[in-house]
Amino acid sequence: MPLKETIRGFKKILDGECDEIPESCFLFAGTIDDVFEKAKKTQ
């Protein structure tokens, strides 16, 4: 994973954009976009 992608995802987490996403959506996710996609599917 490119460093820019890692930093972008980390910033979203720190900014609180992921506060409502269940922890399970973060497991085995590659990028923050994968996390958001998993969260969308679980709703």
Image: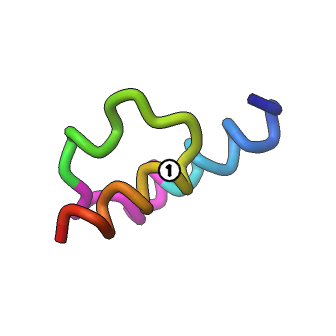
Residue 18: percent from the left, percent from the top? 36, 58
Residue 29: percent from the left, percent from the top? 45, 36
Which residue corresponds to the image point at 59% horizontal and 47% vertical from the top-left? Answer: 9
Question: Is 11 left, or right, of 35 in this rendering?
Answer: right
Q: Residues within 10 Å of mark 1 (few under 14, many from 20)?
A: some
- Residue 15 located within the stretch drawn in magenta: yes
Which residue corresponds to the image point at 28% horizontal and 65% vertical from the top-left? Answer: 41
- Magenta part of the chain: 13-21
Residue 33: percent from the left, percent from the top? 55, 56
- Residue 36 located within the stretch drawn in magenta: no
Dominant secondary-structure state across the stretch colored magenta:
loop
Mark 1 sits on what residue? 34
**Vertical position of residue 23 compared to residue 14: above or below:** above
Which residue corresponds to the image point at 32% horizontal and 69% vertical from the top-left? Answer: 40
Residue that extends furthest to the front in the rendered view of this protein? 41
Question: Is 7 left, or right, of 16 in this rendering?
Answer: right
Residue 11: percent from the left, percent from the top? 58, 50
Which residue corresponds to the image point at 20% horizontal and 62% vertical from the top-left? Answer: 42
User: In terms of depth relative to the viewer, which is nearer, 22 or 10?
Assistant: 22
Q: Quadrant of the C terminus?
A: bottom left
Question: Is 5 left, or right, of 16 in this rendering?
Answer: right
| Residue type at the position of mark 1 | Asp
**Vertical position of residue 15 compared to residue 4: above or below:** below
Question: What is the quadrant of residue 36 in the picture?
Answer: bottom left
Question: Is 10 left, or right, of 14 in this rendering?
Answer: right
